[in-house]
Image (cartoon, grey):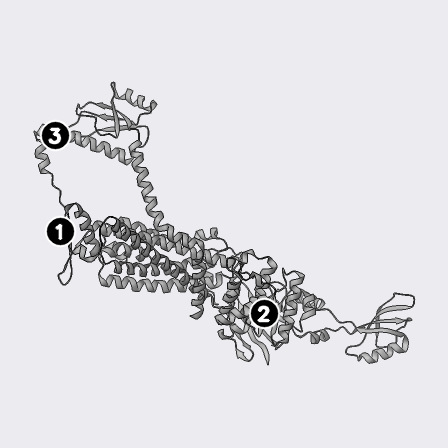
């Protein structure tokens, strides 16, 4: 045990003393918002400066009225066949053909185009046509626009969670899903980045031949565990720094905008001026999210997920001589990660209490990401407990598996390794 | 007491046998040459002694105790494939390796400082290993092998890649370590090193030990009962138990002859015979070199 700690401490010191650690720790919380900001900014700029696409149209129904500012509609006088030929040779975006249509069963509206139009363009045209037809219907049914306006309703269902003892808690799905997405994403990135670092470190030790000296002094398992734990503590430290940085930064921002985040203030919110109502609402929900609980859960699942995958990454690192050889073994490791990552968006955030979501958050290989997607919505205690126990069990299992491959792999040089060889190493007596 | 005793040690891999029921004894305070062609099983044996791998059968006792993890701090090991952490500083590297071998932080720091001073590389203490020359790195590796004052030191091809000055430094250090009570096991292909340094030999071929014992005993075991004589005036051996293998004139009257005697003949008797037939200028037994013994045994083994 002592020697594991010794290795862990050395690993920790080596990583933390590097300049790259400091840079990554400070830059990453700044880089991500910056990337989002730049992307959104350029998207807006692009939309603003985009030249309107030229769409010719032939309207046999007599209903069409050019509208919207996305397209430059130009009527085409002549038969459809000529028009089709014409758009093939000029640089217009397409040809919109509207035949005589039945208002109540509009069919046969076609966009002829020289390229495959994007979803946004087709959507815009659909909208435009729907509006045109709706107006025609209103005229046909003699409905007044003012009547229609009065018919429109905007409802916001307030969601209130009722606890077992009857206490009520207002919730906000958008906030929950935002938190779920953020945590799920962070988990995915963390596990990958730190797992890859373990692998790299082990390949380095193996290729610069220091490993034999080390394992003559300590058991290979101690070396592997020490490295994994050392790197885990680097991750925790980094995470801690980020939390402090973000808290300080956001407090500064709130202070700058004159909003105090303290409890009393939030309690007095009903008296807040109407302009701040939205912010007050958000803060109220924010206040009811158990941040500490979420962070602790995140730390637990980060450690668990990292350890499960870290051990596997370590085994891969021990088996190969150069990083590029590791690709073939990385694939099966990434699959459960990808599954849980994609499920995060497909199922978990949509339906956090659905069957798939629940199972994905319990199975050890997918639970770190899946559970972080769910946990903000509130997860039954038994599910959380089962998931955590299985995660620990999974970590023990992968570590055992990895250690058996690792102890043989680190001493093998220049041998061609495939899955059969790995299996043989695994079975080999020490 | 013996430094190391191995009994019935075997190690099999899926495709080959690395060691087949070997037995050996390594005396305390000796310098042992572990010899054998490539792939004979030397590295496997070394790794077993270092507890990197465990044998399928057999036992090893070290200074009378069953080999166990607690003995790691008694052993110093310089593998053939050796390296250092490139990004680590020299001082950190030495103290880290020493602590892995069981030294306390304070001890590790004191010892490593003393050793770098002794090897005249103290000014490199804060340099990273990647900035060192190859010779410097070798010194660091050697220091890390012996700085915890191990009683048993295992050096796998210690001189490969060492320049003559470093090799000399390390040879002196090895002799002084033996002086201070350590036992040293050498694995090497360099017969001149074996000839000069070792006093005990272990020869492995095809997973078995084919020769073991002190150098002088092995020499006498392989003595060919031939003598080299310088003498003035020819002589004949017909009618005596001796055979004249060859004889050549090197100066006016000076001859150089090789004489073979019956097995275990007392040299004094041979000399008496020689004095009676010629004027003897020098008389010396012709002993086989370790290299000759090695080649004849390994080649002989291959023919079987």
Residue A137's disc is 3
- The residue under label 1 is A271
Subunit bearing disc 2: B
Is A124 on the left-hand or right-hand side of A148? Answer: right
Pointer 1 with pointer 2, Cβ within 8 A: no
- Vertical placement of residue B61 versus A139, above or below: below
Residue A129 location (% of width, % of height): 19, 30
Dot 3 surroundings within 10 Å: few (below 14), some, or many (20 or more)? some
> Which picture quadrant has residue A303?
bottom left
Q: Can residue A321 be seen in the rendering of this structure?
A: yes
Classify 10 Å Cα crowding around label 1: few (below 14), some (14-19), many (20 and above): few
Q: Is residue A322 left or right of residue A183?
A: right
User: Callout 1: helix, strand or loop?
Assistant: helix
Of residues A399 and A100, the one drawn nearer to the viewer in this rendering: A399
Q: Position of residue A392 (x, y in %)?
A: 33, 64
Q: Quadrant of residue B18?
A: bottom right
Same chain, labels 3 and 2:
no
């Amino acid at each position: 045990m002592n020697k594991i700690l010794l290795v862990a401490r050395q690993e920790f010191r080596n990583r933390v003393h590097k300049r790259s650690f400091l840079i990554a720790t400070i830059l990453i919380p700044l880089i991500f918002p910056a990337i989002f900001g730049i992307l959104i900014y350029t998207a807006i700029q692009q939309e603003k400066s985009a030249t309107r696409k030229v769409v010719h149209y032939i309207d046999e129904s007599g209903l069409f009225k050019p509208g919207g500012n996305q397209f430059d509609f130009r009527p085409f006088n002549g038969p459809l066949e000529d028009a089709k030929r014409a758009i093939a040779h000029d640089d217009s975006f397409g040809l919109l053909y509207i035949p005589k249509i039945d208002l109540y069963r509009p069919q046969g509206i076609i966009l002829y185009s020289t390229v495959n139009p994007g979803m946004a363009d087709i959507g815009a045209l659909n909208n435009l046509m729907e509006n045109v037809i709706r107006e025609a219907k209103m005229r046909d049914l003699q409905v007044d626009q003012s009547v229609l306006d009065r018919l429109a309703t905007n409802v916001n269902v307030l969601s209130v969670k009722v606890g077992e003892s009857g206490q009520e808690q207002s919730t906000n799905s958008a906030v929950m899903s935002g938190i779920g997405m953020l945590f799920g994403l962070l988990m995915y990135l963390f596990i990958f980045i730190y797992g890859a670092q373990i692998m790299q470190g082990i390949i380095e030790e193996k290729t610069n031949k220091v490993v034999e000296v080390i394992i003559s002094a300590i058991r290979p398992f101690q070396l592997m565990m020490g490295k994994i734990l050392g790197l885990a503590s680097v991750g925790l430290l980094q995470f801690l720094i980020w939390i402090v940085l973000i808290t300080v930064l956001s407090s500064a921002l709130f202070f700058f905008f004159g909003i105090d985040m303290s409890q009393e203030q939030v309690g007095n919110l009903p008296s807040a001026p109407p302009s701040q109502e939205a912010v007050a609402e958000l803060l109220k929900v924010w206040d009811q999210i158990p941040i500490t609980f979420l962070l602790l859960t995140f730390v637990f699942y980060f450690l668990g997920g990292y350890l499960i995958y870290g051990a596997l990454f370590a085994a891969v690192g021990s088996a190969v001589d150069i990083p590029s050889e590791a690709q073939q073994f990385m694939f099966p490791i990434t699959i459960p990660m990808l599954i849980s990552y994609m499920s995060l968006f497909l199922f978990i955030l949509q339906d956090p209490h659905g069957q798939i979501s629940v199972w994905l958050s319990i199975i050890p290989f997918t639970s770190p990401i899946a559970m972080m997607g769910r946990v903000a919505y509130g997860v039954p205690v038994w599910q959380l407990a089962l998931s955590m126990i299985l995660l620990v069990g999974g970590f023990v299992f992968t570590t055992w598996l990895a250690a058996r491959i690792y102890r043989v792999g680190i001493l093998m040089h220049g041998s061609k390794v495939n899955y059969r060889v790995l299996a043989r190493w695994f079975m080999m007596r020490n | 007491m013996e430094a190391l005793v191995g009994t019935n040690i075997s190690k099999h891999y899926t495709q080959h046998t690395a060691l087949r029921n070997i037995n050996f004894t390594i005396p305390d305070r000796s310098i042992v040459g572990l010899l054998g062609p490539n792939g004979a099983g030397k590295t496997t044996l070394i790794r077993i002694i270092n507890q990197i791998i465990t044998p399928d059968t057999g036992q090893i006792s070290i200074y009378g105790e069953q080999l166990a993890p607690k003995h790691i701090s008694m052993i110093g090991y310089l593998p053939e494939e050796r390296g250092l952490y490139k990004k680590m500083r020299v001082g950190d590297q030495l103290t880290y390796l020493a602590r892995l071998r069981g030294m306390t932080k304070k001890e590790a720091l004191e010892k490593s400082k003393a050793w770098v001073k002794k090897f005249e590389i103290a000014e490199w203490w804060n340099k990273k290993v990647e900035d060192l020359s190859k010779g410097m790195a070798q010194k660091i590796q050697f220091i890390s092998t012996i700085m915890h004052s191990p009683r048993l030191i295992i050096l796998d091809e210690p001189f490969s890649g060492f320049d003559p000055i470093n090799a000399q430094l390390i040879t002196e250090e090895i002799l002084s370590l033996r002086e201070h009570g350590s036992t040293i096991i050498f694995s090497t292909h360099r017969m001149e090193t074996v000839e000069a340094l070792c006093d005990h030999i272990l020869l492995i071929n095809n997973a078995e030990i084919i020769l073991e014992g002190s150098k002088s005993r092995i020499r006498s075991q392989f003595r060919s009962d031939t003598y080299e004589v310088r003498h003035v005036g020819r002589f004949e051996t017909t009618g005596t138990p001796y055979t004249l293998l060859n004889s050549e004139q090197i100066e006016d009257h000076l001859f150089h002859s090789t004489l073979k005697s019956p097995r275990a003949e007392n040299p004094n008797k041979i000399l008496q015979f020689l004095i009676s037939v010629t004027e003897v200028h020098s008389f010396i037994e012709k002993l086989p070199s370790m290299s000759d013994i090695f080649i004849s045994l390994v080649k002989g083994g291959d023919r079987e």
